[in-house]
């Protein structure tokens, strides 16, 4: 899709020109892929405010770059950022914007220490802001990733039973996502059973799932570079009253957060729509993370939906909505879906839900 990546570079160039630098050095891997189409662990782009860009990567990726990025000049180098800084200096660039959010102090020192190196000035998260709004091709890739996730989750439910360890359940789910066609898992799968469910990012271990447990499962498949993110909490055996209470509360809060996620909504207001319900029920101290985040070429990307955050939602912005209640020593509930905020008629717009596994409490 060279024309798509060329259009993205053109939009980025407008932002580079606005920041007052004649060129920018792009080093964040997801941003390089977004602008060129190259998936590489060692690549960077020199993008002038006006004119053609240069993609640098090493010999391991030159074949892929020639195949996937035929419309941009290719520079083969082992140390890609220094090579592009040298190229910028040779082209007469005296002020070069860079992605300060990713570059280390040591890397910055190395680049500015080169003979004739241009002055480096922070670019800001220009490309990340462009990435927030997805084109329809990106949304389709996200939809496939979410479909694979939902299908794999359904396939392993019969394995979530007393005696299986959290780690074994996580491995079974990851295997199901790969077997379904995912290129990889989007992140390390979380399976948190019983009291471990009170730890939002618990690492699945040797604990055996027991009857009476709530089990929180946070998972995602990756397809064509795009990441799904979904969480479900299930009950093993008939749930206790307190378990149903917090599940119903989290489900109600999630519905409120989803309803608030419309184009133009302030991210703090979307967060508050769910958080206020949980606080009113007396569980505010047990929901301390943000309500959600953007997804795409990274599993966590802009926008961040949470208290103390700024910004508004736009159309064609994929986000997660994931409230939770976590009771130390007892367990927890989190329900998370990936959806696309869209313009449309009616109070809900034409919101597009991408994860489709059942949201009601499943009793296994």
Image: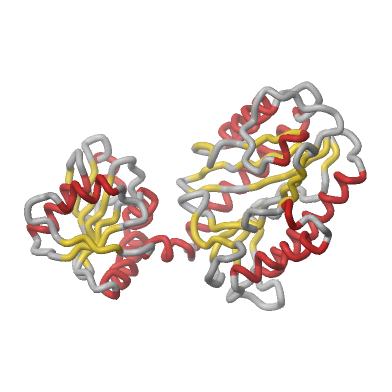
Residues 249 and 52: in front is 249
Task: Tell me the quarter of the image containing the N terminus.
Answer: bottom left
Q: Is residue 353 left or right of residue 255?
A: left
How did the renderer colour the structure? secondary structure
Residues 194 and 348: in front is 194
Vertical placement of residue 329 versus 271, above or below: above
Q: Is residue 355 left or right of residue 9?
A: right
Residue 129 appears at what percent x and percent y? 43, 65
Point 53% across, 42% down: residue: 186
**Quadrant position of residue 123:** bottom left
Point 82% across, 49% down: residue: 247
Point 81% across, 25% down: residue: 162
Task: Tell me the quarter of the image containing the C terminus.
Answer: top right
Q: Is residue 221 left or right of residue 10?
A: right
**Quadrant position of residue 90:** bottom left
Residue 203 appears at what percent x and percent y? 61, 33
Residue 207 appears at what percent x and percent y? 71, 25
Q: Is residue 334 left or right of residue 116?
A: right
Vertical placement of residue 25 versus 176, above or below: below
Residue 147 appears at what percent x and percent y? 63, 47
Point 32% across, 71% down: residue: 15
**Quadrant position of residue 261:** bottom right
């Amino acid at each position: 899709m060279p024309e798509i990546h060329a259009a993205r570079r053109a939009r980025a160039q407008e932002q580079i020109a606005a920041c007052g630098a004649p060129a920018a050095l792009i080093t964040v891997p997801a941003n390089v892929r977004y602008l060129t189409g190259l998936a590489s662990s060692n690549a960077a782009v020199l993008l002038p405010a006006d004119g053609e860009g240069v993609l640098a990567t090493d010999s391991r990726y030159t074949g892929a770059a020639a195949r996937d990025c035929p419309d941009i000049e290719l520079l083969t180098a082992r140390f890609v950022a220094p090579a592009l800084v040298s190229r910028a200096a040779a082209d007469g660039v005296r002020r070069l914007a860079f992605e300060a959010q990713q570059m280390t102090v040591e890397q910055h020192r190395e680049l500015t220490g080169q003979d004739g190196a241009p002055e480096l000035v922070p670019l800001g998260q220009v490309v990340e802001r462009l990435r927030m709004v997805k084109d329809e091709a990106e949304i389709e890739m996200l939809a496939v990733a979410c479909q694979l996730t939902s299908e794999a989750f359904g396939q392993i439910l019969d394995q979530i039973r007393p005696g299986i360890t959290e780690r074994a359940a996580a491995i079974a789910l990851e295997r199901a996502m790969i077997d379904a066609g995912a290129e990889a898992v989007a992140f390390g799968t979380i399976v948190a059973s019983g009291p471990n469910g009170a730890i939002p990012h618990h690492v699945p271990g040797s604990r055996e799932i027991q009857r009476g447990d709530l089990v929180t499962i946070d998972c995602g498949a990756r397809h064509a570079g795009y990441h799904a993110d979904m969480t479900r909490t299930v009950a093993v055996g008939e749930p206790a009253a307190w378990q149903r209470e917090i599940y119903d509360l989290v489900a109600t809060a999630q519905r409120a957060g989803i309803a608030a996620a419309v184009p133009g909504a302030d991210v703090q207001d979307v967060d508050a729509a769910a958080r206020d319900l949980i606080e009113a029920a007396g569980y505010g101290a047990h929901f301390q993370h943000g309500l959600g985040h953007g997804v795409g070429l990274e599993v966590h990307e802009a926008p961040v939906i949470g208290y103390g955050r700024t910004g508004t939602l736009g159309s064609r912005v994929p986000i997660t909505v994931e409230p939770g209640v976590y009771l130390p020593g007892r367990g927890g509930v989190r329900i998370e879906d990936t959806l696309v905020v869209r313009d449309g008629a009616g109070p809900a717009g034409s919101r597009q839900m991408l994860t489709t596994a059942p949201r009601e409490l499943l009793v296994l």
